[in-house]
Image: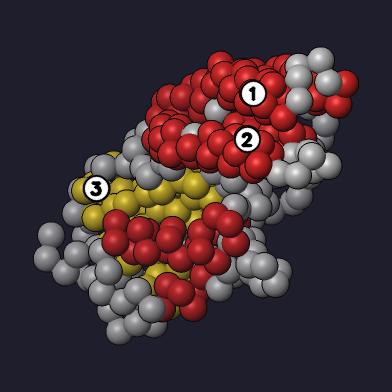
């Protein structure tokens, strides 16, 4: 599981702020010297207020207060050198500089408190993600596997996207899904689906029976809410060890892609999709599993709609099938590493409109 390391980014930003500290002191020194040498009718003292204001944008309250104090002392030196400390113009400049320094120091304090809260939230979210979304092993039975989760919100690393895998006596089963909504409620629904999958994937003989179990678990949990307001799109798959196929039940989820060794990309579009989990009671339908070829060296890509809905600056959606076609010969981890970098580059500013999850599965030619 590839999580963007928020704590590392925070540490890096603190190192950057230390490098920036020279700027306000250079500004104070330049303004002080020029102000002393300037003609009597020129007063540059107001420019000293920029020093603590600048510092407050990247440093803590203590450093901001210290820079403000240095700026005030510089203004006192200018006043004493050019006229006297009792000069009315310089007195007002000193008072104004003190007030500005106090204000920006307070704002720096508020920003620092918020940053600590964000770091704590990220740490808790990353821990919760590892509990809810257990990392997939890079080898499950004969299959090579890789997974990634990219959060849209910078303050959190977990949302309603989900995935899991389970070994059975004859093969491997996977689920990938997306809970409607965001926040803690979505996290709870994702945990419910994953728990139901892990509990039943080994017990249900048929893939359709597994989907029925998941539907019953989700529907029972959502009975207390508004009907039709909460649901989970999902793709549930089974890859037998001794057959070059993949069986799929789609519950309103985007179709998985298969990358062939020759570079062809095939979408696993089911003829009849089941309704999203939690909506079966509202739509009359029969759950059916469809079988698709999945041969040696084929790579199966599962993903959530956050990947498809990523936009660039012009509003163009991410062309997933086109980008996957350029990844011929890549193993699962290399494929996901490439797609993640490409996806974040496509979504200007490394910002996604929605959480995104991907799972890549390869059937090696020789186990």
Where is 192 relative to 144, above or below? above
- Residue located 67% across and 67% down the image: 313
- The quarter of the picture where residue 200 lies is top left
Q: Give the SS element for disc 1.
A: helix
For residue 67, say whether it is visible. yes
Q: Give the SS element for disc 2.
A: helix
Image marks 2 and 3: residues in contact by CB distance under 8 Å = no
Task: Measure the C-alpha gap from mark 2 to mark 1.
Answer: 8 Å
- The first of marks 2 and 1 along the sequence is 2
Name the spot of residue 183 as percent of width and height, x first: 66, 31
Classed neighbour count for the residue bearing mark 2: other residues with Cα under 10 Å, few (<14), some (14–19), many (≥20):
many
Classed neighbour count for the residue bearing mark 3: other residues with Cα under 10 Å, few (<14), some (14–19), many (≥20):
some
Name the spot of residue 292 as percent of width and height, x first: 41, 69
**In this picture, residue 268 sits left or right of residue 325:** right
For residue 128, say whether it is visible. no
- For mark 3, what is the residue? 138
Image marks 2 and 1: residues in contact by CB distance under 8 Å = yes
- For mark 1, what is the residue? 77
- Residue located 32% across and 42% down the image: 136
Q: Give the SS element for disc 3.
A: loop
- Residue located 65% across and 52% down the image: 353
- For mark 2, what is the residue? 32
- Residue located 43% across and 61% down the image: 341
């Amino acid at each position: 599981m590839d999580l963007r390391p928020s704590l590392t980014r925070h540490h890096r930003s603190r190192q950057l702020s230390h490098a920036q500290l020279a700027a306000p002191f250079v500004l104070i020194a330049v303004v002080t010297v020029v102000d002393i040498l300037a003609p009597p009718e020129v007063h540059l003292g107001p420019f000293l207020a920029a020093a603590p204001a600048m510092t407050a944008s990247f440093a803590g309250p203590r450093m901001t207060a210290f820079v403000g104090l240095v700026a005030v002392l510089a203004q006192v030196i200018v006043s004493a050198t050019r006229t006297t400390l009792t000069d009315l113009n310089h007195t007002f400049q000193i008072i104004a500089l003190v007030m500005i320094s106090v204000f920006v120091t307070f704002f720096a304090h508020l920003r620092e408190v918020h940053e600590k809260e964000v770091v704590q939230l990220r740490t808790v979210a990353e821990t919760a993600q590892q509990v809810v979304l257990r990392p997939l092993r890079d080898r499950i039975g004969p299959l090579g596997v890789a997974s990634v989760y990219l959060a849209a919100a910078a303050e959190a690393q977990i949302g309603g996207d989900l995935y899991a895998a389970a070994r059975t006596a004859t093969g491997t089963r996977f689920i990938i899904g997306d809970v409607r909504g965001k926040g803690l409620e979505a996290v709870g629904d994702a945990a419910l689906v994953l728990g139901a999958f892990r509990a039943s994937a080994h017990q249900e003989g048929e893939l359709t029976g597994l989907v029925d179990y998941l539907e019953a678990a989700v529907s029972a949990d959502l009975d207390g809410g508004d009907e039709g307001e909460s649901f989970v799109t999902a793709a549930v798959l089974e890859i037998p060890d001794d057959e070059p196929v993949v069986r799929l039940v789609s519950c309103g989820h985007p179709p998985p892609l298969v990358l062939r060794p020759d570079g062809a990309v095939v979408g696993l579009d089911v003829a009849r999709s089941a309704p999203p989990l939690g909506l079966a009671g509202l739509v009359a339908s029969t759950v059916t599993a469809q079988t698709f070829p999945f041969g040696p060296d084929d790579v199966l890509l599962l993903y959530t709609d956050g990947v498809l809905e990523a936009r660039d600056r012009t509003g163009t959606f991410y062309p997933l099938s086109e980008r996957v076609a350029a990844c011929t010969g890549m193993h699962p981890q290399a494929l996901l590493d490439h797609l993640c970098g490409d996806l974040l580059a496509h979504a200007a500013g490394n910002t996604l409109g929605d959480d995104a999850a991907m799972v890549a599965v390869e059937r090696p030619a020789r186990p």
